Amino acid sequence: MIELKNLNKTFNDIHAVDHITGIIRDGMVFGLIGSNGAGKSTLLRMISGVIRPDGGELLVDGKPVYENPEIKSQICFLSDTPYYFQNADLREMRDYYAAVYPAFNRKQFDSLTGIFHLDMKRKINSFSKGMKKQVSILLGLCTGTTYLLCDETFDGLDPVVRQAVKSLIAAEMVNRDFTPVIASHNLRELEDFCDSIGLLHQGKLLLTEDIDQVRSKICKLQCVIQDPLREQELLRSLPVIKSERTGSLLTLTVRGERAEVMRIAEAQDPLFIEVLPLTLEEIFISETEVAGYDIKDFFLH
């Protein structure tokens, strides 16, 4: 388990991580969502022990990470810009990772490079951006560490490879104690993959919840109610986050379970009624607007 307690980090006049508190539980895929500059990379580097927090406490399995080789040996951090030794091929990087991580699975790595059609003898600096990212992911998965921290993991991967990587991560979670933490600025990329998601904005952790919980407590209601008084009664009866109107069609973003929202709306005798689930992007935009942030333009579409 990863515990963040009032975690703080500043670079000169930039408050990269602003007193973050939260928990990342074991055996789940945790998605760390935020715009460029939100603090995702800084947070991952602190969790991996690359940089020291200015304040607060960061514990992995109950122990501090920074300058703790025992804990750091169970964490693999994959940067958004993978580094490889000059003129190294896959065999050299495999051997290096095997020297650093005692549990590194050479047989698995060799097998996966074949599946992904990566030439073991070819110089990595001759690979495309997407191929370099594939190599980084395969090296990370084969380290055998408990925690894999991925910064913009899927950026640069084509859709087929992206899905293959997700399948590999899921298989690792079935076969051993494994907790991936995946940072991305694209919420839709992780929507069908993560068990829990945290939203970072300007160094602050605005939201962190299990996806099922997020989806169960907010929905979109569309309805047409002829009687203005009944419509006003509906608006008073529901915890409305956002209200929009197109002609006679009223669209409400509502906090509450779908069945209960439907029950309350049907009591006002609507001509038309429909309750729809929201995408995670819609949910987070609604929630952050309530919190006073306007982040519509921060996620890729």
Image (spheres, grey):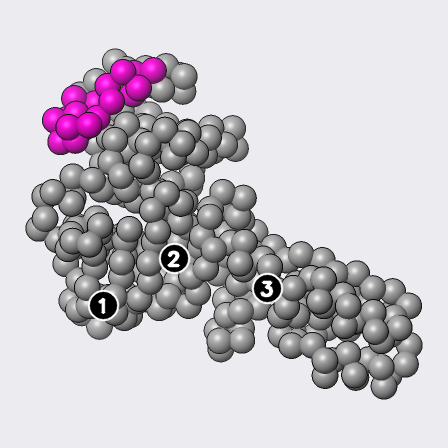
Residue assigned mark 2: 36
Q: Secondary structure at mark 2?
A: loop
Residue assigned mark 1: 8
Q: Residue furthest bottom?
A: 229
Kindly report the distance in space between the C-alpha atoms of the residues bearing marks 3 and 1.
31 Å
- Disc 2 marks a residue whose amino acid type is Asn
- Horizontally, residue 54 falls left or right of residue 131, namely left
Residue 174, position in %: x, y? 40, 32
- Horizontally, residue 291 falls left or right of residue 272, namely left
Q: Secondary structure at mark 1?
A: strand
Kindly report the distance in space between the C-alpha atoms of the residues bearing marks 1 and 2.
18 Å
Is label 1 or label 2 in front?
Answer: 1
- Disc 3 marks a residue whose amino acid type is Lys
Residue 263: assigned label: none
Task: Please identify the dominant SS of the magenta region.
Answer: helix
Residue 205, position in %: x, y? 37, 66
- Disc 1 marks a residue whose amino acid type is Asn
- The first of marks 3 and 1 along the sequence is 1
- In the rendered image, the vertical position of residue 21 relative to residue 194, given as above or below: below
